Amino acid sequence: MAFEAKTISCCDCGSNFIFSVEDQEFFQTKGFSNAPKRCPACRSARKTERTGVSNYTSSYNTRQMFPATCSDCGKATQVPFEPRNGKPVYCSDCYRKVSANR
């Protein structure tokens, strides 16, 4: 099925937005049969209202971080868990090296 970009008026704010060919293909792969009624900004705002979180990244960024010293290179770093004595803690660069060798 060939798609064409469509201009749609948002039911919330009234602004026009483009329902692109790529978006239409995405909707088809997800099994959505209806075109969106809201512009991307209003869809995002509505999703935030419903879930209380704007996206995964924002909740991830608020995660408590703990100071640590990398067991491999000695660099000061922060990790998303409380380090325990006797357990090695790595900075992100050293962790990639160590985990690649496993």
Image (cartoon, rainbow, N blue to C red):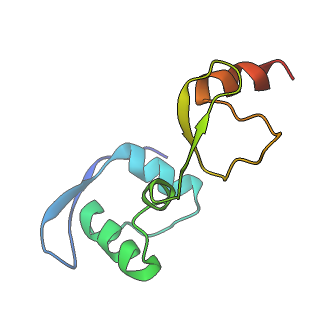
| Position of 62 relative to 84 (above/below) | below
69 horizontally vs 43: left or right: right
At 42% across and 77% down in the image, what residue appears?
A: 52
At 61% across and 30% down in the image, what residue appears?
A: 91
| Position of 30 relative to 69 (above/below) | below
Q: Quadrant of residue 94?
A: top right
95 horizontally vs 26: left or right: right
Q: Which quadrant holds the C terminus? A: top right
Counting from the top left corner in percent of width and height, residue 20 is at 32, 48
At 15% across and 75% down in the image, what residue appears?
A: 13
Counting from the top left corner in percent of width and height, residue 26 is at 49, 50
44 horizontally vs 91: left or right: left
Q: Relative to the observer, which residue lies in front, 2 or 16?
A: 16
At 38% across and 66% down in the image, what residue appears?
A: 35
Q: Relative to the observer, which residue lies in front, 10 or 52?
A: 52
Instruction: Looking at this view, name the residue that lies furthest to the right.
Output: 102
All told, the count of numbered labels is 0
Q: Relative to the observer, which residue lies in front, 66 or 8?
A: 66
Counting from the top left corner in percent of width and height, residue 83 is at 70, 47
Counting from the top left corner in percent of width and height, residue 1 is at 49, 46
